Amino acid sequence: MRLALAQLTPTAGALDRNTERAREAVATAADRGADLVVLPELWDVGYFAFDSYERAAEGLDGDRLAAIRETAADEAIAVVAGTVVEDLAASAATGEETPADEGLANTAVVFDADGERRLVYRKHHLFGYDSAETRLLEPGERLPTTTLCGFELAVTTCYDLRFPEQFRALADRGATLVAVPSAWPYPRVEHWRTLPEARAVENLWYVAAANGVGAVGDERLVGRSTVYDPWGTTVVGAGTETGVVTAEVDPERVETVREEFGALGDRRPY
Protein backbone atom coordinates (compact mmCIF):
# COMPACT_ATOMS: atom_id res chain seq x y z
CA MET A 1 0.00 0.00 0.00
CA ARG A 2 1.29 3.45 -0.86
CA LEU A 3 0.77 5.98 1.91
CA ALA A 4 1.10 9.75 1.51
CA LEU A 5 1.53 12.58 4.02
CA ALA A 6 0.50 16.11 3.04
CA GLN A 7 2.40 18.92 4.75
CA LEU A 8 0.43 22.18 4.52
CA THR A 9 0.54 25.77 5.78
CA PRO A 10 -2.93 27.19 6.51
CA THR A 11 -3.53 30.88 5.80
CA ALA A 12 -5.42 32.74 8.54
CA GLY A 13 -8.94 33.66 7.51
CA ALA A 14 -8.69 31.93 4.13
CA LEU A 15 -10.95 28.92 4.57
CA ASP A 16 -11.69 28.51 0.88
CA ARG A 17 -8.03 28.78 -0.11
CA ASN A 18 -6.99 26.35 2.60
CA THR A 19 -9.62 23.91 1.40
CA GLU A 20 -8.37 24.22 -2.17
CA ARG A 21 -4.81 23.52 -1.01
CA ALA A 22 -5.99 20.42 0.81
CA ARG A 23 -7.84 19.21 -2.28
CA GLU A 24 -4.77 19.83 -4.41
CA ALA A 25 -2.66 17.81 -1.96
CA VAL A 26 -5.11 14.91 -2.13
CA ALA A 27 -5.01 15.02 -5.93
CA THR A 28 -1.20 15.15 -5.90
CA ALA A 29 -1.06 12.10 -3.65
CA ALA A 30 -3.40 10.25 -6.00
CA ASP A 31 -1.27 11.23 -9.01
CA ARG A 32 1.73 9.68 -7.23
CA GLY A 33 -0.10 6.40 -6.83
CA ALA A 34 -1.05 6.72 -3.17
CA ASP A 35 -3.90 4.63 -1.81
CA LEU A 36 -4.25 6.72 1.36
CA VAL A 37 -3.25 10.30 2.21
CA VAL A 38 -3.12 11.95 5.64
CA LEU A 39 -3.73 15.70 6.05
CA PRO A 40 -2.46 17.68 9.09
CA GLU A 41 -4.36 19.04 12.08
CA LEU A 42 -6.69 21.99 11.48
CA TRP A 43 -5.55 22.53 7.91
CA ASP A 44 -8.70 24.58 7.35
CA VAL A 45 -8.33 27.32 9.97
CA GLY A 46 -4.86 26.89 11.52
CA TYR A 47 -4.37 25.52 15.02
CA PHE A 48 -3.36 28.80 16.65
CA ALA A 49 -6.17 30.87 15.09
CA PHE A 50 -8.28 30.41 18.22
CA ASP A 51 -10.38 33.52 17.59
CA SER A 52 -11.54 31.96 14.31
CA TYR A 53 -12.65 28.58 15.65
CA GLU A 54 -16.29 29.45 16.29
CA ARG A 55 -16.74 31.24 12.97
CA ALA A 56 -15.08 28.41 11.06
CA ALA A 57 -16.86 25.52 12.75
CA GLU A 58 -19.08 23.23 10.68
CA GLY A 59 -20.87 19.96 11.25
CA LEU A 60 -19.66 16.71 9.77
CA ASP A 61 -21.77 17.43 6.70
CA GLY A 62 -20.23 20.88 6.25
CA ASP A 63 -18.84 22.27 3.01
CA ARG A 64 -15.13 21.74 3.70
CA LEU A 65 -15.39 18.07 4.62
CA ALA A 66 -17.77 17.61 1.70
CA ALA A 67 -15.08 19.03 -0.59
CA ILE A 68 -12.52 16.53 0.72
CA ARG A 69 -15.03 13.68 0.43
CA GLU A 70 -15.75 14.60 -3.17
CA THR A 71 -12.05 14.79 -3.99
CA ALA A 72 -11.45 11.39 -2.40
CA ALA A 73 -14.15 9.88 -4.61
CA ASP A 74 -13.06 11.75 -7.74
CA GLU A 75 -9.42 10.71 -7.28
CA ALA A 76 -10.23 7.20 -5.96
CA ILE A 77 -8.02 7.65 -2.89
CA ALA A 78 -8.75 7.19 0.82
CA VAL A 79 -8.19 10.30 2.94
CA VAL A 80 -7.56 10.94 6.60
CA ALA A 81 -8.97 14.45 6.33
CA GLY A 82 -6.67 15.83 9.00
CA THR A 83 -8.78 17.59 11.59
CA VAL A 84 -11.27 20.43 11.36
CA VAL A 85 -13.19 22.47 13.92
CA GLU A 86 -16.49 20.65 14.30
CA ASP A 87 -19.74 22.30 15.38
CA LEU A 88 -21.15 19.58 17.62
CA ALA A 89 -24.68 20.98 17.60
CA ALA A 90 -24.74 20.92 13.80
CA SER A 91 -23.50 17.32 13.77
CA ALA A 92 -25.96 16.25 16.46
CA ALA A 93 -28.81 17.80 14.48
CA THR A 94 -28.10 15.35 11.66
CA GLY A 95 -28.20 12.37 14.02
CA GLU A 96 -24.46 12.01 14.62
CA GLU A 97 -23.22 10.68 17.96
CA THR A 98 -21.33 13.52 19.67
CA PRO A 99 -19.65 13.94 23.08
CA ALA A 100 -21.84 16.98 23.83
CA ASP A 101 -25.02 18.51 22.46
CA GLU A 102 -23.22 21.75 21.67
CA GLY A 103 -19.74 23.25 21.57
CA LEU A 104 -16.76 22.58 19.35
CA ALA A 105 -14.39 19.66 18.82
CA ASN A 106 -11.08 19.07 17.05
CA THR A 107 -12.29 16.31 14.75
CA ALA A 108 -10.64 13.93 12.30
CA VAL A 109 -12.67 12.20 9.59
CA VAL A 110 -11.61 9.29 7.37
CA PHE A 111 -13.11 8.81 3.90
CA ASP A 112 -12.52 5.75 1.77
CA ALA A 113 -11.76 5.83 -1.95
CA ASP A 114 -15.49 5.92 -2.72
CA GLY A 115 -15.94 9.00 -0.56
CA GLU A 116 -17.74 7.09 2.19
CA ARG A 117 -17.16 8.25 5.75
CA ARG A 118 -15.47 5.42 7.63
CA LEU A 119 -14.31 6.92 10.92
CA VAL A 120 -14.77 10.01 13.09
CA TYR A 121 -12.26 10.72 15.84
CA ARG A 122 -12.37 13.71 18.19
CA LYS A 123 -9.12 14.69 19.87
CA HIS A 124 -9.00 13.28 23.39
CA HIS A 125 -6.17 15.25 25.00
CA LEU A 126 -6.65 19.01 24.78
CA PHE A 127 -3.47 21.04 24.99
CA GLY A 128 -3.47 23.43 27.94
CA TYR A 129 0.01 24.92 27.73
CA ASP A 130 -0.35 28.45 26.25
CA SER A 131 -3.33 27.15 24.30
CA ALA A 132 -7.05 27.89 24.33
CA GLU A 133 -8.00 24.33 23.39
CA THR A 134 -9.21 23.37 26.85
CA ARG A 135 -11.44 26.45 26.98
CA LEU A 136 -12.82 26.24 23.45
CA LEU A 137 -13.18 22.53 22.73
CA GLU A 138 -14.90 19.42 24.01
CA PRO A 139 -12.67 16.31 24.29
CA GLY A 140 -13.56 13.17 22.40
CA GLU A 141 -14.72 9.98 24.10
CA ARG A 142 -14.38 7.22 21.49
CA LEU A 143 -11.38 5.33 20.07
CA PRO A 144 -12.71 3.96 16.77
CA THR A 145 -10.82 1.92 14.19
CA THR A 146 -11.70 0.95 10.63
CA THR A 147 -10.39 -1.61 8.17
CA LEU A 148 -8.88 0.27 5.23
CA CYS A 149 -6.23 -0.48 2.61
CA GLY A 150 -5.31 -3.74 4.32
CA PHE A 151 -4.73 -2.11 7.73
CA GLU A 152 -6.80 -1.66 10.84
CA LEU A 153 -6.57 2.12 10.89
CA ALA A 154 -6.87 4.38 13.92
CA VAL A 155 -6.44 8.13 14.29
CA THR A 156 -5.05 10.22 17.12
CA THR A 157 -4.19 13.93 17.09
CA CYS A 158 -0.97 15.81 17.93
CA TYR A 159 -0.87 16.21 21.75
CA ASP A 160 -2.30 12.68 22.09
CA LEU A 161 1.23 11.48 21.28
CA ARG A 162 2.25 12.27 24.87
CA PHE A 163 -0.20 9.73 26.30
CA PRO A 164 1.00 6.20 25.45
CA GLU A 165 -1.92 4.54 27.20
CA GLN A 166 -4.24 5.78 24.45
CA PHE A 167 -2.09 4.11 21.82
CA ARG A 168 -1.92 0.86 23.79
CA ALA A 169 -5.72 0.87 24.00
CA LEU A 170 -5.81 1.16 20.20
CA ALA A 171 -3.37 -1.72 19.88
CA ASP A 172 -5.73 -3.78 22.04
CA ARG A 173 -8.48 -2.90 19.58
CA GLY A 174 -6.42 -4.39 16.77
CA ALA A 175 -4.99 -1.25 15.16
CA THR A 176 -1.99 -1.78 12.86
CA LEU A 177 -1.62 1.75 11.46
CA VAL A 178 -2.16 4.99 13.37
CA ALA A 179 -2.46 8.30 11.54
CA VAL A 180 -1.55 11.35 13.62
CA PRO A 181 -2.65 14.67 12.11
CA SER A 182 -0.70 17.35 13.95
CA ALA A 183 0.16 21.03 14.30
CA TRP A 184 3.39 20.58 16.26
CA PRO A 185 5.25 23.86 16.86
CA TYR A 186 8.78 24.96 17.61
CA PRO A 187 10.77 24.69 19.81
CA ARG A 188 9.83 21.05 20.58
CA VAL A 189 11.44 19.49 17.50
CA GLU A 190 13.06 16.63 19.41
CA HIS A 191 9.76 15.74 21.02
CA TRP A 192 8.15 15.57 17.58
CA ARG A 193 10.88 13.19 16.43
CA THR A 194 10.83 11.02 19.54
CA LEU A 195 7.18 10.55 20.46
CA PRO A 196 5.72 9.08 17.24
CA GLU A 197 8.80 6.88 16.86
CA ALA A 198 8.31 5.62 20.42
CA ARG A 199 4.62 4.93 19.81
CA ALA A 200 5.63 2.81 16.78
CA VAL A 201 8.28 0.90 18.75
CA GLU A 202 6.03 0.26 21.75
CA ASN A 203 3.16 -1.14 19.74
CA LEU A 204 4.99 -2.67 16.76
CA TRP A 205 2.86 -0.97 14.12
CA TYR A 206 3.06 1.85 11.59
CA VAL A 207 2.68 5.46 12.66
CA ALA A 208 1.96 8.12 10.02
CA ALA A 209 2.53 11.54 11.59
CA ALA A 210 1.38 14.37 9.28
CA ASN A 211 2.36 17.81 10.56
CA GLY A 212 1.68 21.34 9.45
CA VAL A 213 4.56 23.62 8.53
CA GLY A 214 5.35 27.31 8.41
CA ALA A 215 3.91 30.27 10.29
CA VAL A 216 0.46 30.09 11.86
CA GLY A 217 -0.15 33.36 13.67
CA ASP A 218 2.76 33.99 16.01
CA GLU A 219 3.82 30.35 16.03
CA ARG A 220 5.77 28.23 13.56
CA LEU A 221 5.12 24.55 12.93
CA VAL A 222 8.08 22.22 12.62
CA GLY A 223 6.95 20.17 9.60
CA ARG A 224 9.03 16.97 9.41
CA SER A 225 6.05 14.72 8.72
CA THR A 226 7.20 11.11 9.00
CA VAL A 227 6.09 7.50 8.54
CA TYR A 228 7.62 5.03 11.02
CA ASP A 229 7.52 1.27 10.53
CA PRO A 230 6.87 -1.32 13.29
CA TRP A 231 10.57 -1.24 14.31
CA GLY A 232 10.43 2.55 14.63
CA THR A 233 12.50 2.97 11.48
CA THR A 234 11.79 6.01 9.33
CA VAL A 235 10.19 4.93 6.04
CA VAL A 236 9.87 8.45 4.67
CA GLY A 237 10.27 11.91 6.16
CA ALA A 238 9.49 15.40 4.96
CA GLY A 239 11.53 18.52 5.62
CA THR A 240 10.32 22.00 6.46
CA GLU A 241 8.53 22.88 3.21
CA THR A 242 4.98 22.30 2.05
CA GLY A 243 4.43 19.26 -0.13
CA VAL A 244 3.48 15.60 -0.30
CA VAL A 245 5.71 12.62 0.50
CA THR A 246 4.88 8.97 -0.14
CA ALA A 247 6.02 5.61 1.19
CA GLU A 248 5.31 1.93 0.63
CA VAL A 249 3.89 0.26 3.74
CA ASP A 250 3.00 -3.41 4.14
CA PRO A 251 0.22 -4.68 6.43
CA GLU A 252 1.93 -8.06 6.66
CA ARG A 253 5.05 -6.45 8.09
CA VAL A 254 3.18 -5.66 11.30
CA GLU A 255 2.33 -9.34 11.78
CA THR A 256 5.87 -10.41 10.85
CA VAL A 257 7.53 -8.03 13.32
CA ARG A 258 5.13 -8.95 16.10
CA GLU A 259 5.81 -12.64 15.55
CA GLU A 260 9.56 -12.05 15.47
CA PHE A 261 9.60 -9.83 18.55
CA GLY A 262 6.74 -10.76 20.85
CA ALA A 263 6.86 -7.89 23.31
CA LEU A 264 3.10 -7.35 23.22
CA GLY A 265 2.59 -10.91 24.38
CA ASP A 266 4.95 -10.37 27.33
CA ARG A 267 2.84 -7.60 28.84
CA ARG A 268 1.77 -7.84 32.47
CA PRO A 269 -1.16 -5.42 32.80
CA TYR A 270 -1.38 -3.56 36.12
Image (spheres, grey):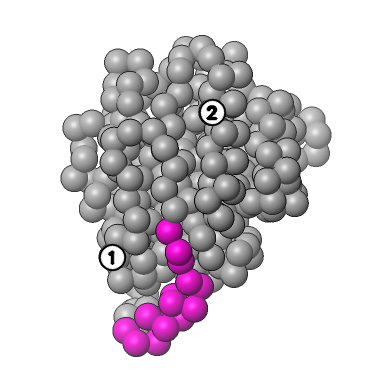
Give the quadrant of residue 261: bottom left
Residue 29 at what x, y percent from top left?
53, 46
Is residue 256 in sight in this rendering? yes
Label 2: which secondary element: helix
- Image side of residue 50 versus residue 143, left or right: left
Is residue 172 in sight in this rendering? no
Q: For the magenta stretch, what is the residue range?
A: 247-261
> What residue is at 43 percent from the left and 77 percent from the top?
253
Residue 136 at what x, y percent from top left?
49, 23
- The residue carrying pointer 1 sits among few (fewer than 14), some (14 to 19) or many (20 or more) residues within 10 Å by Cα, namely few
Between marks 2 and 1, how big is the CA–CA gap?
Answer: 30 Å
- Image side of residue 251 versus residue 86, left or right: left
> What residue is at 45 percent from the left and 47 percent from the top?
5
Q: Amino acid at mark 2?
A: Arg
Residue 259 sits inside the magenta stretch: yes
Q: Nearer the viewer, residue 87 or 205?
A: 205
Residue 138 at what x, y percent from top left?
53, 32
Q: Amino acid at mark 1?
A: Thr
The residue where tag 2 is placed is 21
Q: Main secondary structure of the magenta part?
A: helix
Residue 207 sits inside the magenta stretch: no
The residue where tag 1 is placed is 233
Compared to residue 252, the image places residue 124 above or below, namely above
Q: Where the C terminus falls, by quadrant?
A: bottom left
Compared to residue 12, the image places residue 113 above or below, namely below
Give the quadrant of residue 265: bottom left
> What residue is at 41 percent from the left and 68 percent from the top?
205
Q: Nearer the viewer, residue 75 or 149?
A: 75
